[in-house]
Amino acid sequence: MTSSKEQKILIIVGPTASGKTRLAVELAKTLNGEVISADSRQVYRGLDIGTGKATKREMQGIRHHLLDVSSPKKVFSADDFVRHAQRAIADISKRGKLPIIAGGTGFYIDALVGRMTLPDVPPNPTLRKRLAEKTPAQLYTLLKRKDPVRAASMDTPSERGNKVRLIRALEVATVHGCGGLTSTWRSDLHNEYNALWLGINPPFEALEQKIRARLAARLKRGMIAEARRLHATGLSYKRMEALGLEYRSLARFLQGTITRTQMEEELARDIRRYAKKQLTYWKRNTDIRWISSPRANTPIAAIRRWLS
């Protein structure tokens, strides 16, 4: 029986809109694989257009795992992702196929392969109740004082507005102090699987164009109607905002806080910033072999040698 450290997994990372899903599907077809999504919001049911979840047509018959596994009303943690992904890897491997991890949530992938050790801090109901009374801005200011390392890693609009994650970070900082979560990342801890890493890093001007084009396409497909439907079926605007990026701006627009033009401008700006943050996160991983596009220079020969 193959141990987890002998189990081969192919990992595809990169910024949003870079083509990770397309490359994952193409390689799955070529290498007899299945795709495991590593996206912190695509795990939620109903968050389809706003998260860019792959359609049946885009999947091209390739089975995808870790999509639609949780209600958006609940919080799906990195611990949850690791448990689900481990089961998916074992299932895919048992059927003689190659597990292909593809997604932009770096923390999830690092936790899965062992580069990031999750903090063993139990929930503190008293602390959580007290912190829940504060605004996201107040929580982020408090986190900057208690753990500037963790605060820096959450310096995006979606993260700074996510009360659940901010409260959890403060909960960990209260126990472990500065760096209690992020300082556990080490490049020599990647021992859980035999992983081959590919990263897509297109020229940033081209990526910006893709981000704008994809945002326009999502709006045309009905992203606003999707948000209205989510709220009508019980997803609060507060929770929608906590889900970040598209849903944060959509919630603000639906409540009349911003105009549609402001929403579109805000989203284009925030998604662009998020893409830069993703690239900064992955650049510290020297195991990643970077390519400029899903089609231009995929090292298929090197992948086959690794698999042999």
Image: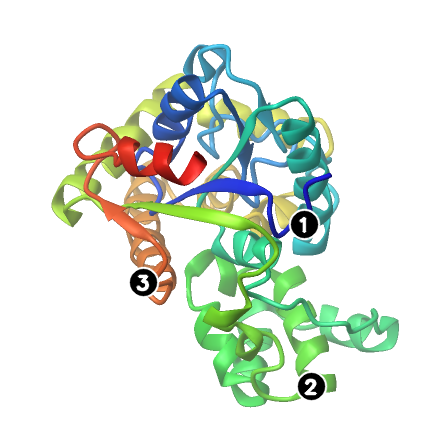
Q: Residue tagged by mark 1?
A: 82
Q: Quadrant of residue 118?
A: bottom right
Q: Nearer the viewer, residue 192 or 252?
A: 192
Please state if 89 lies on the left or on the right of 222 as rendered: right
Residue 253, given in percent of the width and then of the height, sits at 46, 40
Q: Residue tagged by mark 3?
A: 283
Alpha carbon distance from label 2 to label 3: 26 Å
Residue 102, given in percent of the width and then of the height, sits at 46, 38
Rendered position, 204 above or below 306: below
Alpha carbon distance from label 3 to label 1: 22 Å
Please state if 95 lies on the left or on the right of 202 as rendered: right
Per the rendering, the mark at residue 8 is none
Q: Residue tagged by mark 2?
A: 176
Rendered position, 200 above or below 186: above
First in sequence, mark 1 or 2: give its number: 1
Eye-nearest disc, 2 or 3: 3
Give the residue type that dot 1 points to. Answer: Val
First in sequence, mark 2 or 3: give its number: 2
First in sequence, mark 3 or 1: give its number: 1
